[in-house]
Amino acid sequence: MQRYGFDVGPASIDNTKVADPNRAFFQDPIESVGVILQSIGVIAVVLGLLLIYNTVMAIVAQQTAQIGELKAIGATSGQILIVYFSIVLAYGLIALLVSVPLSLLAGNALRQSMVAMLGLTPADWIVLPAPIIYQVLICLVAPMFVAAFPVLRGARVTVREAISSYGLRGGSRLDDLLARLRGVPRTVSLALSNAFRNLGRVGTTQLALAGAGLTFMAVLSARAALVFTLGGVLIQAYPYQVQLDLAEPTSLERVEQAARLDGVSGVEGWRLQSATIRRTNAPEQVDDPNVLLTGVPLPTQSYSPTISAGRGLQPGDTYALVVHESEADELGVGPGDWVLVSIPDPGGERRWASQEHWQVVGVVIDITMAGGVLAPRATLFDLLGSQAINRVQLQSADGSPAGTVALAAQVRAFFENQGITVQTSDAPTVTQRSAAQLANTSVVISLLLLVALIVAGVGAISLNGTLSIAVLERRREIGVLRAIGSTPGGIRTQLVIEGLVMGLLSWLIAFALSYPASLATAALIGASLGITVVFQYEWLGVWIWLALAAVIAVIASLSPAQQAIRMSVQESLAYE
């Protein structure tokens, strides 16, 4: 092809000459979404199992007196186990009947939307047996293991423990400490005491509620990092907002005439050249990666990328390269290493127009430059024997998104009038490219927000179940408080404060662990997408979860509080 005058470049998306016929070009982004979906599934299952644990605990607590009555008339522990495991199995069957059809519909809808984003036509819908088997195990088997502890604990309750003193308790060390505090209202001290009455249950509740908060903060931080990487980092990297590629290399002098146009405050020409690269002293392979050698003037005013290792190009550099992170990983090179860059001969008279050893001086992060290598423009001009450029960077004097779009159209028309063909591009400006990158990851961002909402809802249900158990266990205590003069409003306030204490504790735990969790989540998402995410900690997520934790605590405590004050004093004291 080169002998016949064709400029040969890589045909595959990963910049290699040989593509795997068994691997689609879109497989990497699809697999990245799959990793995120699997992570969401694991989080949902874990939080759901914690919810099952609290629900079964609430049922057993509510029916402790009935368990005592059944044992009093001859029921064995085995029979009690069969009753409650049957309840858990019934819940699992209902969940299975609901989840299987909904998951099939949701999976098909997600499949169609992702295939449509790729511009392809969906194939026939195929139901695989493995996900159905997973759902059966999650809905029928996993709940049995999770419910085993509360069910076994309830079945071991003796008749005397079940029907004699249920709902009453003695003082604790925390009660003694709170009693010594001066100026603390009795309602607040009772709420604090009751909140930590059962430390095991507090731990279980915090696993769900604090886990929900931790996931919420990590997801929002990961989303902020992703948005910043695809938006803020890209905009910062390109101070010159307009980028136009030329169909054919054009002399630098002709291109720089655009600087005289109104609205243009800066023009810079780049030279892009396809080349093959490999480590120095490594044997040539047919699948040696192709790179886009990008010659930039030194110093460049139009490009300021994020350097992850080493340094950027500096005036005086000759055979120096700044390599994109993906290319550095593929070649296994870093700052200080040497590589052999081979530029094909466009005339076809010989195989290579140039083969030179270059030193890698830095590694760059830039999502728009995947497979690219930065080189000094002057050196590239010398190797090619021409000062022609094929990419133009322009700075808009206006600077606004609308102004840069208008400037791109104006410069394109100017070049066309000069006989310079500009390649068609849907995103000639930095803001347009940033918007396009964000649109490409909209599915990932939507999934992250969805999981944040899911875990918040699970945390609310878990706290509601915990407070309901507390009310059931303290009905006699509540009856005693009512008998000695406590008002329904006082009882309600006590339970709301108890819920707020649990919510605030979950926020503190989640906040303490949020930074490393957010960092790990952002790294996981970046690895799944094949990019390095510039981490951004989302402080807004911390304060949003604080507000949500308070709202969730109040809402979750209102139903148990109403349940506690609805029963009369006589019914509470006679509760069995």
Image (cartoon, rainbow, N blue to C red):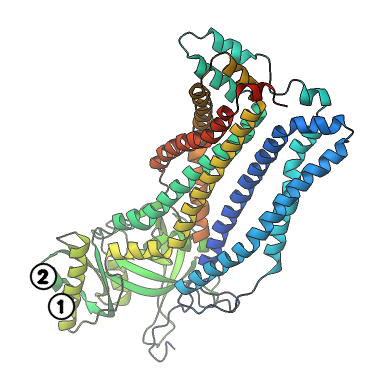
Point 68% across, 58% down: residue? 96
Q: Residues within 10 Å of mark 2 (few under 14, many from 20)?
A: few
Answer yes or no: do the residues labelled 2 and 1 have beta carbons within 8 Å?
yes
Image height check: is 333 above or below 508? below
x, y percent for residue 344: 41, 79
Which quadrant is the C terminus positioned in? Answer: top right
| 17 on left or right of 391 | right
**First in sequence: mark 2 vs mark 1:** 2
| 304 on left or right of 92 | left
Instruction: Name the residue at the bottom extreme.
Output: 4
- Amino acid type of the residue that numbered disc 1 sits on in the rendered structure: Phe
User: Which labelled disc corresponds to residue 524?
Assistant: none
Point 59% across, 57% down: residue? 38
x, y percent for residue 44: 59, 50
Total numbered circles: 2
User: Which labelled disc corresponds to residue 261?
Assistant: 2
Label 2 sits on a secondary structure element that is loop
User: Which labelled disc corresponds to residue 414?
Assistant: 1
Which quadrant is the N terminus positioned in? Answer: bottom left
Residue 534 visible: no
473, 423: nearer the viewer: 473
x, y percent for residue 307: 38, 53
Label 1 sits on a secondary structure element that is helix
- Amino acid type of the residue that numbered disc 2 sits on in the rendered structure: Leu
322, 10: nearer the viewer: 10
| 36 on left or right of 220 | right
